[in-house]
C-alpha cells in the first residue's frame, strides 16, 4: 500500500504527470518561463535582426522583420572593421595564454601537491593571495614596467600578464585535484626509480587531462574577453584583439548603427555556436573555475 | 624514498609559474605601494610627498562617492544575480519537461564578451531607437520613457540590470548543480506530507544549498569591485559621475590626468578594502560551517 503511494508521488515529481493534476499551474509555468526567455533572447535576436537592416529601418521599425536579409552589412563590417586582423590576434594571444597557463600551472601544482620542499606553504600563500587580487591593484606599476621593457604594443605584452593573472586559480584547481590522488601511486613509481620529471610527464600529466580541459576553457574565455590591459597596452591597430578592436571600430563608426550591429553580431554568433556544441564542458569549466 | 628526488627539483617545477607571477603581479603590487607616496606623472621627477596622496584621496568627493556607487552596484547584483539566479534554479528544478532547455538558454549571456553585452545594452537603452523606450511607447506608457543612461537617477540601476541579465544564469547553474545533489527521498517525503512547490523551494532547496548561496554572495561582492568593462563602455562614469565606480575612476586618474602617484594611492586603498572584505568573508564562512565544497 505505502509503496504504491510513493510511486505515484515519485512520478508526479519527476515530471510529465504533474500536468494532468494541475494543468493551470502547468500552463502558467511555461508562460512564465517563455516570458523570461524573451527577456534573455530578445536583445540578442534584435541585435542580429538589426544587423541586416538599413540605418533608417533600425529607427523606424525595430520589431518588424528586416525587409531583406542583407549580408552586405556583415561583409562590410568585416572588411572595414579589420575584423580578420582582430580575430587572428585574439586567436594568437588566447592560444599562447592557455598553453602557458596549462604548462606552468601543472608543473607548479605537481610540486605543491606531491613534493616536499622548504617554503612551499609560503609560496602557495602567495598564489592564494593572487586569487583575490584584482587587476586594478597593480596595473599602474605593471604598465610602467612594460613601458620600460618595451613590451607594450607586442603580443607578449598581453600574453605575459594574462598567464600571470590566470596562474593562481589554475594552480589552485589542479592542486586541489592532485591532492586527492593517492600517494601510493607515486611512491611505487619512485621505487621503480622514476625521477620527478618522469613522474610529472608520465603519471601526473595524463591524470590531469580532464581538469586541464576545465582550466583551459575558463582561461581561454578570460583571455578572449579581456579589455582593460588590451586597451592600455596596445595602440597599434594591427595588434589589437577583438574587444579593443571593437572599441576602436565603434569610435570610428559611431553613428553607422548597421555596421556596429553587424560587427557585434559577427562576434556574438560564433560564441553561441561554440556554446551549443560544447555547453557541457563550458558550463562545467566556468562554474568550477569560479567556485573552487 | 630512494634518493632520486633532487633537492632542487621542486623549485625547478614551480619556478616558471613563480617568476612570471612575481613579474606581472607581485612586483607591480609592491611598486604601486611605493608609487603611492610620490607626486609623479610617470615621466618627470618623482617627488616624495609622504601621505599627501592618501589625504587627498579621503577628501576626493568623486572617489568617496565611487565606493557608494560600487556598494549600490554590489547590493543590486546580489539581488538581480544571486537571488534571481536562485529563483531560476528553483524553477528549473521543479521537474517539468523541457526545463533543461531553459537551463541552457539562461546561461547564454555568460558566454558573450562583456564588451558585446555593453554595446548591445547601450543600444537597448538608446533613447531614439532602443528597445525599451519603443516597447514603452507601444504599450502606452510614453511618460515612462527616459534617456536611461543619460539620466543620473537611472543610469546606475540600468547598468545593474544588465549585470543581472548576464550573471543570473551563471548563479542559476551553480545552484542547480547543488539542488541536483539533494537526494530524491527528501522531496518524496515532503510531497507525501503535502508540501507545495513554494514550500519545497523555501524549506528544502534553499536551506540545503545555503553554502553555495553564501559563496555566491561573496563572489558577487569580490567581483563587484573588479567590474570595469560594463561601466567603461556604457557610461564611463557619467552622467555627472553618477556611475563612477572605483575602477573607472582609477583608470581616469592615471591615464587621462596622468597622476601616477595619486592613482597608485587610490589603488592601494582599494586593495586594502578588498583584502579586509575578503578576510571578514573568510572568517564568517569558517565560523558558519566546516567545508565549503561544491
Image (spheres, coloured by chain):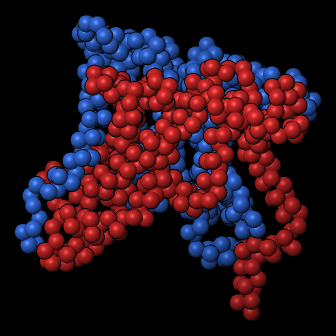
Query: Which residue is nearer to you in this view: B269 or B126?
Result: B126
How many numbered callouts? 0
**Furthest residue toward left:** B3
Q: Residue B196: x, y in percent?
A: 75, 66
- Residue B160 appearing in the image: no
Looking at the image, residue B129 lies above or below residue B256:
below
Q: Residue B28: x, y in percent?
A: 29, 29
The quadrant in which residue B97 appears is bottom right
Residue at image position (64%, 31%) is A79
In this image, A274 relative to B290: left or right?
Answer: right
Q: Residue A48: x, y in percent?
A: 75, 40
Looking at the image, residue B50 lies above or below residue A284:
above
In this image, B148 relative to B18: left or right?
Answer: right
Residue at image position (67%, 31%) is A77
Query: Which residue is nearer to you in this view: A183 or A213?
Result: A213
In this image, B242 relative to A233: left or right?
Answer: right
Residue at image position (59%, 50%) is B170
Query: Which residue is nearer to you in this view: A156 or B96?
Result: A156
Colour assignment, chain B:
blue
Write down which chain is painted red. A
Quarter of the N terminus of chain B within the rendering: bottom left
Q: Residue A123: x, y in percent?
A: 22, 47
Amino acid at each position: 500500500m505505502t509503496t504504491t503511494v510513493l510511486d505515484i508521488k515519485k512520478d508526479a515529481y519527476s515530471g510529465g504527470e504533474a500536468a494532468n493534476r494541475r494543468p493551470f499551474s502547468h500552463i502558467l509555468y511555461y508562460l512564465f518561463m517563455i516570458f523570461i526567455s524573451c527577456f534573455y533572447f530578445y536583445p540578442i535576436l534584435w541585435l542580429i535582426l538589426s544587423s541586416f537592416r538599413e540605418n533608417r529601418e533600425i529607427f523606424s521599425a525595430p520589431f518588424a522583420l528586416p525587409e531583406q536579409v542583407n549580408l552586405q552589412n556583415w561583409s562590410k563590417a568585416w572588411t572595414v572593421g579589420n575584423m580578420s586582423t582582430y580575430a587572428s590576434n585574439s586567436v594568437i594571444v588566447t592560444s599562447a595564454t592557455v598553453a602557458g597557463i596549462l604548462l606552468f600551472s601543472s608543473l607548479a601544482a605537481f610540486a605543491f601537491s606531491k613534493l616536499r620542499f622548504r617554503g612551499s606553504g609560503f609560496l602557495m600563500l602567495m598564489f592564494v593571495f593572487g586569487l583575490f587580487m584584482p587587476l586594478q591593484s597593480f596595473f599602474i606599476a605593471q604598465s610602467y614596467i612594460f613601458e620600460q621593457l618595451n613590451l607594450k604594443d607586442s603580443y607578449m605584452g598581453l600574453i605575459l600578464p594574462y598567464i600571470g593573472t590566470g596562474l593562481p586559480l589554475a594552480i589552485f584547481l589542479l592542486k586541489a585535484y592532485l591532492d586527492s590522488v593517492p600517494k601510493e601511486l607515486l611512491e611505487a613509481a619512485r621505487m621503480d626509480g622514476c625521477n620527478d620529471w618522469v613522474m610529472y610527464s608520465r603519471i601526473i600529466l595524463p591524470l590531469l587531462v580532464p581538469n586541464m580541459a576545465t582550466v583551459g576553457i575558463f582561461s581561454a574565455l578570460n583571455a578572449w574577453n579581456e579589455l582593460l590591459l588590451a586597451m592600455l597596452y596596445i595602440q597599434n591597430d594591427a595588434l589589437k584583439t577583438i574587444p579593443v578592436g571593437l572599441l576602436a571600430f565603434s569610435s570610428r563608426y559611431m553613428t553607422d548603427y548597421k555596421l556596429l550591429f553587424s560587427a557585434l553580431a559577427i562576434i556574438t554568433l560564433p560564441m553561441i555556436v561554440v556554446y551549443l556544441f560544447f555547453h557541457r564542458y563550458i558550463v562545467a569549466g566556468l562554474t568550477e573555475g569560479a567556485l573552487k | 624514498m630512494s634518493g632520486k628526488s633532487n633537492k632542487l627539483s621542486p623549485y625547478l617545477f614551480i619556478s616558471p609559474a613563480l617568476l612570471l607571477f612575481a613579474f606581472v603581479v607581485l612586483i607591480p603590487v609592491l611598486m604601486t605601494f611605493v608609487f603611492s607616496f610620490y607626486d609623479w606623472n610617470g615621466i618627470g621627477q618623482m617627488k616624495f610627498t609622504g601621505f599627501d596622496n592618501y589625504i587627498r584621496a579621503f577628501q576626493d568627493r568623486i572617489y568617496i562617492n565611487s565606493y557608494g556607487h560600487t556598494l549600490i552596484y554590489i547590493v543590486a547584483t546580489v539581488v538581480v544575480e544571486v537571488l534571481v539566479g536562485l529563483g531560476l534554479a528553483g524553477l528549473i528544478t521543479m521537474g517539468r519537461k523541457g526545463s533543461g532547455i531553459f537551463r541552457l538558454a539562461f546561461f547564454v549571456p555568460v558566454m558573450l564578451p562583456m564588451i558585446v553585452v555593453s554595446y548591445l545594452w547601450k543600444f537597448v537603452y538608446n533613447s531614439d531607437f532602443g528597445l525599451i523606450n519603443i516597447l514603452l511607447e507601444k504599450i502606452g506608457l510614453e511618460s515612462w520613457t527616459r534617456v536611461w543612461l543619460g539620466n543620473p537617477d537611472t543610469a546606475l540601476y540600468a547598468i545593474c540590470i544588465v549585470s543581472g541579465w548576464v550573471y543570473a544564469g551563471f548563479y542559476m547553474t551553480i545552484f542547480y548543480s547543488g539542488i541536483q545533489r539533494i537526494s530524491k527521498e527528501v522531496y518524496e517525503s515532503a510531497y507525501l506530507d503535502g508540501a507545495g512547490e513554494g514550500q519545497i523551494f523555501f524549506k528544502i532547496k534553499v536551506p540545503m544549498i545555503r553554502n553555495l548561496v553564501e559563496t555566491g554572495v561573496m563572489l558577487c561582492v569580490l567581483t563587484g569591485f573588479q567590474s570595469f568593462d560594463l561601466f567603461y563602455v556604457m557610461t564611463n562614469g557619467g552622467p555627472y559621475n553618477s556611475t563612477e565606480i572605483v575602477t573607472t575612476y582609477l583608470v581616469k586618474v592615471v591615464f587621462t590626468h596622468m597622476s601616477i602617484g595619486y592613482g597608485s594611492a587610490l589603488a592601494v586603498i582599494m586593495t586594502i578594502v578588498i583584502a579586509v572584505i575578503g578576510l571578514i568573508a573568510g572568517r564568517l564562512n569558517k565560523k558558519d560551517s566546516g567545508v565549503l565544497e561544491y
